[in-house]
Amino acid sequence: MRIAIVTCARMPEPDEDERPLMDALAAAGVDATLAAWDDPTADWPRYDAAVLRSTWNYHRAPQAFAAWVDAQPRLWNPPSIVRWNAHKRYLLDLERAGIDVTPTALLVKGSDARLADVMRARGWSDVVVKPAVSGGSYATLRVTSTNLGQGEAHLRRVVATEDTLVQAYLPSVEGHGERAIVWIAGELTHAVRKSPRFLDGHEAVDLVPIEPDERAFATRVLAPYVDSILYGRVDVARGPDGRPCLMELELIEPSLFLRRHPPAIDRLVDAIARL
Ligand SMILES: Nc1ncnc2c1ncn2[C@@H]1O[C@H](COP(=O)(O)OP(=O)(O)OP(=O)(O)O)[C@@H](O)[C@H]1O
Ligand SMILES: [Mg+2]
C-alpha cells in the first residue's frame, strides 16, 4: 500500500506536522511519500491513496486545484467534501442548518456593494474583509471607522476578481482566543488557542483543554461528516453572547498541531495505515 502525503511545490510557510507525521508513518512501516499536488511530474496512479496535508497554495489556483481533486481516485478527505469546503459560502450553508457561525455577508465577484453600506445594513461597526476562497489569512483586513477608506479600497480590489466575505469582527479572538479543535479518525483529540495573525502576521499557538461547550459544539458541527472524513478541525470563537461560534470548519488541509499532542500522531498514522 503506497500513500501520498500531499503538499505543494512552494510552501508559503513550513508545515510543523510534516516531520512528525512522516517519521511516525515510516516507523509504523507505512510506505508514504510526500508529493506536491502542483508537481506536473507526480505520478498519482502509483499511489493507493492520497492524503491532503499542506496544499497551502490552492486558494491562489482554485480551479486547477479543483480539477486535480476531482481526478484523484482515492483522496482524503473525499473530493466532494474538499470542493464544498474550499469556498467559505459553506459558512452560510451551516448557518442555515442551525449552526452559530461568525455573522457573514457574501459579496459575489464583481459586486459594487459599498463596505459602508454593508456595515450599516447589518449593524456592524467592526468587520473583517477576506476572500471567500482563502487560507493563511491571505488578504484579510480588519476594518473599523478609523480605516474605512482603506477597507473600502481593499474590498474593491478583492471583490473585483473573487467572491468576498464581510464578517462581523468577533472580539473574543483577543481574549478567550480562537480555539482550533482537532478531530482525527473518530474523536476530538486536542485543541489549541491561536492568536490573531493580522495583528502582527505571526500566529502563536498554545495547547489548551477542550472546553465542554466547545466539545459539544464541534461534535455537532462535524456530525454530518464524521463517517466520510479522516481528519478535520473546527475553529471556534465566541459570539457576543459568549456562546461558541464557528470561525472556520477546516476539512481540506488543516494544520493539526501534532507536536502539541503526540497521541494524535499515532491516531492519524493508524488511520492512514487502515486506508
Ligand atoms: N470575523 C472575524 N473576527 C475576528 N477575527 C477574525 C475574523 N475573521 C478572521 N479573523 C482572524 O483572522 C484569521 C484568519 O481568518 P480565517 O481563519 O477566516 O481565514 P483563513 O485565511 O482561511 O485561515 P487561516 O489563517 O486560519 O489559515 C483568524 O484566525 C482570526 O484570527
Ligand atoms: Mg483560520
Image (tube, rainbow, N blue to C red):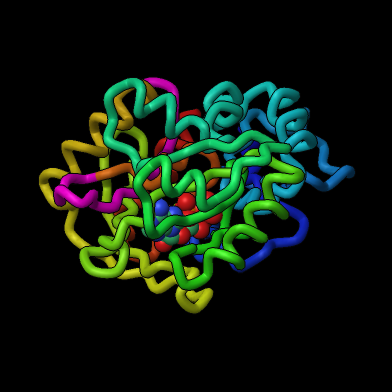
Query: For the point 39% across and 24% down, which residue is it?
Result: 225
Q: Is residue 34 visible?
A: no
Query: For the point 55% across and 32% down, which residue is it?
Result: 76
Q: Nearer the viewer, residue 135 or 95?
A: 95
Q: Residue furthest bottom?
A: 200
Residue 21 percent coordinates (x, y): 50, 55
Q: Residue furthest left?
A: 212
Q: Nearer the viewer, residue 98 or 75?
A: 98
Q: Is residue 40 visible?
A: yes
Query: For the point 61% across and 41% down, which residue is it?
Result: 113
Relative to 208, is 137 on the left or the right? right
Relative to 31, is 254 on the left or the right? left
Q: Is residue 239 magenta?
A: yes
Measured along the vertical axis of the image, is residue 72 above or below residue 129? above
Q: Nearer the viewer, residue 110 or 39?
A: 110
Relative to 177, is 45 on the left or the right? right
Measured along the vertical axis of the image, is residue 257 above or below residue 274? below
Residue 257 percent coordinates (x, y): 40, 59
Residue 120 percent coordinates (x, y): 42, 47
Q: Is residue 12 magenta?
A: no
Query: For the point 56% across and 59% down, which residue is it?
Result: 140
What is the tally of numbered marks visible in this picture?
A: 0
Residue 264 percent coordinates (x, y): 34, 51
Tell me the quarter of the image containing the N terminus.
top right
Q: For the magenta stretch, what is the residue range?
A: 227-244
Q: Nearer the viewer, residue 37 or 63?
A: 63
Relative to 83, is 162 on the left or the right? right
